[in-house]
Image: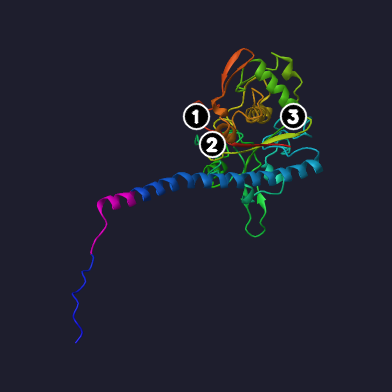
Amino acid sequence: MAPRHPARAVSRRGFTLIELLTVIAIITLLAGITFTVLPRVREKARITAMVGTAKQMQTILVNYMTSSKSYPPMYGYVSLDARDIAAGDPIDLNYYFRRPYMALMKSHGQEDLYDNFSESGDTDRDEAISLLEFSPIGNKDIASGAVTFDESELYNGSNLGTERSRQLNAEKRPLTYIAVNASQAKAARRYWVETGDFLGTTWNRNDTNALRNITFPPPTLDAYVLISVGPSGSTFGLLGDPPTGNYDPQHIYYVAALRAYYLATRDLNDNGALDFEFQARTQQDEGATEYDVNGTPVNNDLPDPANAKNAGPLIFTSP
């Protein structure tokens, strides 16, 4: 008979407290890295997608310019062919453009070309729709697919309540499009810089020769910017109130656009980085820039005082 061997003892040793704490610390560290890095990766991916969308829009705009010899007008602009029509003549609805630029380019409702960072038509999050934020959604006929717009009156910031409400509750909106005449935009910029009005809040064509040669409507629209609210989710005042001063009320949209274009393309220290652009402010420290302009110290603050130190929107300029 084979000899019997004593039973082997079964090890029941568990984790020590130190081992458990070490594992917890590692998991916590990995989770912290994930929560820190993942949002940045997603943000970068969305910015890359937005850059791609902007390039598509730029191609469409170039094709429009090639065929029309002008970029499309913005909502509220006086028609380039309406110089001799009485201002606001209700009989001639073509005096003002009352359709969004996307409709003129036959891309209205094409959401893959919209601002993928937007959450409504309210680009500055002030619970209102300003003149330059207004981009009609229109009414779509289910059977034909045709979209019609309310062209009975021009939006003045308080009327067209149903359309305004729809824009406040929209999930996405087109990229903000600001079209100007390049030479006139340069003249306006010179006026604001020379007078030390670095945020373009005033307009007095009697003060300087810079504004006297600006005609309404402009001879052509040959420059533009496209603006996305970007990761920060706001335009931070770039689409704010029009300048105050002496210009005819029917040209308020164009004067407001000249200011918005000036702010969007502003580079007061000529370093090649736009003063209020998101990537310039977050990657090139443009938001912290301080410099001297004609003897006046300037902080690179955004037009919205409540968010002056924040990052700005994404800005794409015309070729």
Task: Please say if the residues under marks 1 and 2 sit with CB atoms less than 8 Å apart.
Answer: yes
Residue shown at the point (71%, 43%) measured from the top left: 58
Amino acid type indicated by mark 2:
Ser
On screen, residue 147 above or below 131: below
Q: Is residue 169 shown to the viewer in this render? A: no
Residue type pointed to by label 1: Asn
Q: Nearer the viewer, residue 86 or 101?
A: 101
**Which image quadrant for residue 275?**
top right
- Which callout, 3 or 2, points at the residue further toward the start of the chain? 3
Measure the C-alpha gap from mark 1 to mark 2. Answer: 10 Å
Distance in Å between CA atoms under marks 3 and 2: 26 Å
- Residue 187, percent from left and from top: 72, 22
Q: Label 3 is placed on what type of residue?
A: Ala
Badge 3 crowding class, 10 Å Cα cut-off, few under 14, some 14 to 19, many 20 or more, is: some
Residue 90 image position (x, y, % from top left): 70, 36
**Circle 2 sits in a helix, a strand or a loop, which is it?**
loop
Q: Is residue 109 above or below residue 261?
A: below
Numbered range of the magenta stretch: 12-24
SS class of the residue under badge 3?
helix
Q: Toward the viewer: 107 or 25?
A: 25
Query: Tag 2 or tag 1, which sits nearer the N-term?
Result: 2
Q: Quadrant of the C terminus?
A: top right
Query: Quadrant where the N terminus lies?
Result: bottom left
Answer with mark 3 or mark 1, whichever residue precedes in sequence: 3
Q: What's the CA distance linking mark 3 and mark 1?
A: 29 Å
Residue ID for mark 3: 182
| Disc assigned to residue 307 | 1
